[in-house]
Structure formats: C-alpha cells, structure tokens
Image (tube, grey):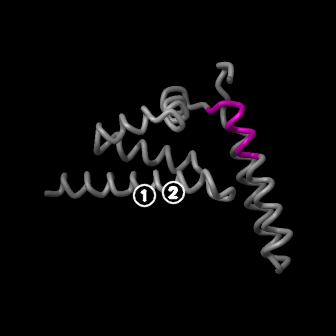
Amino acid sequence: MLKTTKRLMLVTLGSLCVILGVIGLAVPIMPTSPFLLVAAACYARSSDRLYNKLLANPLFGPMIREWREKGTVTRQVKWLSIGTIVISFTVSIVFFINHLVGRILMAFVGVVVILLLYRLPVSDRSET
C-alpha cells in the first residue's frame, strides 16, 4: 500500500511538473527546464513508461538526457535562459512593481538567478 501511494504521488508530481514546464514555454517568467528535470526524476522512480516517453520527446528529451548524463546544458539554453530572465524581470520591475523595496528585491532575485545560471557547466558538443 505504501509503495503504491508513493508511486502515485511521484507520478502525480511528475505530471504536474510536465504541465508547468509546458506552460513555461509560453510564459517568459516561468522556467521550463527545472520542472522537466523534476518530472524526469519523479518518473525515473515511479514509471518507466512515463520516463521513457519524456526522454523520447524530441523537444525535452535531449536536454533532460544531457543534464542527467553529464550535468551540463548547451550554451544556447544557458544564454536563452539568462536573456529571458533579464527581459522578464526588467519588464516586471519597470511596469508592474510600484514599491522601491519590491523593485530592489526583484532585482536581487534576478541577479542571483542569473549568477546561478551563469555558473551552470556548458556541454562541449556543438549546437545545431
């Protein structure tokens, strides 16, 4: 019973993360990669079928495999992520946050996220 409950929870969390990752493709401030990596980890522990299906996805599979096998991202993914953060956080700070403290906190979070992304190791394979 406990094993079945754990499996169901992992499948549910993984599926929720896939949904959030797909939403992240359209919503600039919402990340895609972290949700998909969590989904892959959940599926790897609960459902071979869903894990293999996620890895076989032509859009998500290569990024997930690269992270799981090498712990790296492509240079394109890294700079696209940083660019998205810069644009979305700047728009939020300029147009949507009216309080100085809120702007400072948002800028601080943006800088921290950018630094974390910048430190990610880049794969040495060529991008096409």
Q: Which mark is residue 20?
A: 2
Q: Give the Cα distance between marks 1 and 2.
A: 6 Å
Residue 14 spot, x, y in % from top left: 39, 51
Q: Which mark is residue 16?
A: 1
The answer to whether residue 109 is left or right of residue 72 is: right
Badge 1 vs badge 2, beta-carbon distance below 8 Å? yes
Picture layout, residue 81 above or below residue 64: below
Query: Which segment did they paint magenta?
Result: 73-82
Which residue is the extreme one toward the bottom?
99
| Label 2 CA crowd tier, 10 Å (few <14, some 14–19, many 20+) | many
| The quadrant where residue 101 appears | bottom right
Q: Nearer the viewer, residue 104 or 55?
A: 55
* Residue at x 79% of width, y 75% of height: 97
- Indicate the quadrant containing the N terminus: top left, top right, bottom left or bottom right: bottom left
- Indicate the quadrant containing the C terminus: top left, top right, bottom left or bottom right: top right
The amino acid pointed to by label 1 is Leu
Q: Magenta includes 7?
A: no
Q: Magenta includes 74?
A: yes
* Residue at x 47% of width, y 55% of height: 19
Q: Which mark is residue 86?
A: none
Q: Nearer the viewer, residue 42 or 87?
A: 87
